[in-house]
Amino acid sequence: MADETYIYAGAEAHGLYRKKASETHWEQLTNGMPPMPQARPIAIHPQHPEVLFVGTQRGVYRSQDRGDHWQRMHLPEGRTVWSLQFHPHDPQIMFLGTEGSEVYTSSDGGETWHYLSTIVNPDAVQMAFATRILGLAIEPPNPNRMYAALEVGGAARSADGGKNWELVNRYFDGNVDLMDLHGVALGSPRADVVCIANRVGVWRSRDRGDSWENLHLEKFSSIAYSRGVQTAPNDPNTFYACVGKDFGSTAGGMLRSTDLGETWQRFDRGVTPDSTTFGIAINARHPEQVYFCTRRGQVFGTHDGGTSWAEHRLPESAMNVISIACA
């Protein structure tokens, strides 16, 4: 089928998986990947869906044939990649974020990567791992304006394309639940509304991070801990949010807001996620197709905007599933 949808899921333990939406079998992708890959962010080229990137514990890998073959891109050794983002107007330009809060950029379609900056937060909460950049977002009207979500270092913004960063944590400092950011997304036609996901839920800024407000997901859902937030590709006023009770909970789901976060509804009606939701994927070509993954390996998908859902459970070998993509 010429317009077949492919789904990709990444597990922090035991790799990267792929299936066609029309099929039931998941295939583990290994050709050219490192041994025991820890698959984290998955980024699909916005113009060529056969080209995709995945961040791992050994840098970033690219496939040019929907995952059949992989090649490690030129990024200095020792970098664990936690976020990937395409430039909104030129997909030859890419950005990535690492464990250690480094930002790298590529100007040749991901072939080679060059160090750009390090986001330093001396007040970051000390964890067993270095501060990670779990999300990057870029304003399409002004691509020099960028935002980063730091685990567990709060929010940062750049006004010069990622060369320099300013922390915007005045509302979060000193509270580990608020500083533990898991994602960032931009909304409104001007892309000037910033939403971040943390342990409490989703917070919003209407002034590019100068001030933040809690959107109180608990008013709309019995679970509010959020592992990510994403904007609909066809509607900048619509956000999707991953939810659960906590990192390792036995409940998960997905919320959607169509009014820039003012109100939310459960989007995953009629299904039963058995663990916290860790990733959302929206098909840019067909935004009525939405998938989400749970930490324990469930994948749920709708092709009719949430009216009906199907479950696509990953093999038992897939553990700590944290990312999903589709095209």
Image (cartoon, grey):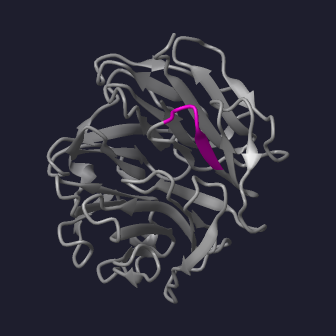
Residue 51 belongs to magenta span: yes
Q: Residue at x 34, y 80 (%)?
A: 168
Compared with 125, 290 (above or below) is above
Tell me residue 122's x, y (percent).
Answer: 52, 89
Question: Start and end of the magenta stretch?
Answer: 48-54
For residue 123, side relative to residue 262 (left or right) = right
For residue 67, side relative to residue 142 (left or right) = right
Looking at the image, which is closer to me, 311 or 194? Answer: 194
Looking at the image, which is closer to me, 129 or 98? Answer: 98
Looking at the image, which is closer to me, 296 or 81? Answer: 81
Compared with 46, 180 (above or below) is below
Q: Is residue 198 visible?
A: no
Tell me residue 7's x, y (percent).
Answer: 54, 28
Compared with 24, 149 (above or below) is below
Compared with 221, 227 (above or below) is below
In the picture as drawn, the residue positioned furthest to the right comes out as: 35
Q: Residue at x 64, y 74 (%)?
A: 130
**Residue 307: quarter of image:** top left
Tell me residue 201's x, y (percent).
Answer: 34, 56
Q: Residue at x 28, y 43 (%)?
A: 221
Looking at the image, which is closer to me, 263 or 59? Answer: 59
Residue 231 belongs to magenta span: no
